[in-house]
Image (cartoon, rainbow, N blue to C red):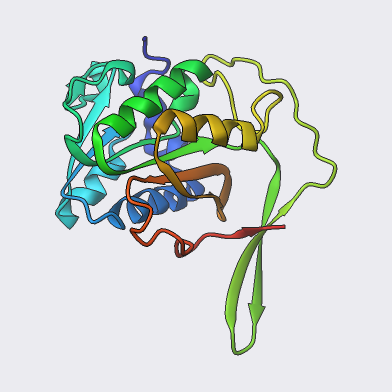
Amino acid sequence: MKKQVDKSHYRFSRYLHKRRWASIWHQVDEVLQFEPARVLEIGPGAGIFKAVCTPLGVNVETVDVDPELEPDHVCSVLDLPFADASFDVSCAFQMLEHIPFEDSLKAIAELARVASKGVVVSLPDADPAWPQMLTVPGVGKRAFLLRRPFFKPRDHRFNGEHYWEINKRGYGLEHVTSRLVSAAGLDLARTYRVEEFPYHRFFVFARDPSSGWSSQSAGTATEA
């Protein structure tokens, strides 16, 4: 595995736009719901997730193949040098699409192997959707995503970074979800798209299906 982008790719003005900040909020929120003490993050990027979690009392260790990003461990997600259940939670945000799909299934299996409580990942979803907000007097605000009608998946072309994306031809949501669940060997607690940034879709896997994951996370939107 080789790095795909230079460290400068993650500079604040280019990479960390407001919509991505919203996605980072969900990263932290989902992981914290497991009440973890130790978390493994694959592909730390600009290091924001770790920077937010550390003051909250969560020990985050990072993995990347690029030493320039100064991860805690320089290694491949396909062969993590950790014993089974070494961490409470493992996570990978907008990372698995950077390797071929079959390799991403091996990666999710590794993430599940080293996690005792659960796995949280986010992936790009190419199905166009527009965030909407409805305010109901006496009820409050309700967010939902309005999907583009008559959407037809298109072929994915490798752009030097993404090998595949959800809802590109051959990578329909149901197909990708079933393959991820099978590879992880864990229960899929939920999947949803970030209302402020629908391009990011989250998957939350829980080892214990009775751990309270039936309710929807705060701030997520329904799809219409």
Q: Position of residue 128 (x, y in %)?
A: 71, 42
| Picture residue at 60% right of the left edge, 37% below the top | 125
Q: Quadrant of residue 16?
A: top left
For this orientation, the residue located farthest to the right is 150
Position of residue 33 relative to residue 108, above or below, is below
- Residue 184 visible? The answer is yes
Q: Residue at x 45, y 26 (%)?
A: 96
Q: Is residue 140 above or below residue 219?
A: below
Look at the image and tell me in which quarter the C terminus lies. Answer: bottom right
Question: Residue drawn at (68%, 23%), measured in percent from left and top?
Answer: 170
x and y percentages locating residue 1 in the rendered image: 36, 10
> Image check: 168 left or right of 8?
right
Where is residue 86 shown, x and y percent of the image? 16, 34
In the rendered image, the vertical position of residue 84 relative to residue 130, given as above or below = above
Q: In the rendered image, is residue 100 in sight?
A: no
Q: Residue furthest top?
A: 2
Total residue callouts:
0
Residue 172 in the figure: left or right of residue 29: right
Q: Residue at x 52, y 19 (%)?
A: 101
Residue 75, quarter of the rendered image: top left
Q: Position of residue 91 (x, y in %)?
A: 33, 38
Q: Nearer the viewer, residue 200 or 173?
A: 173
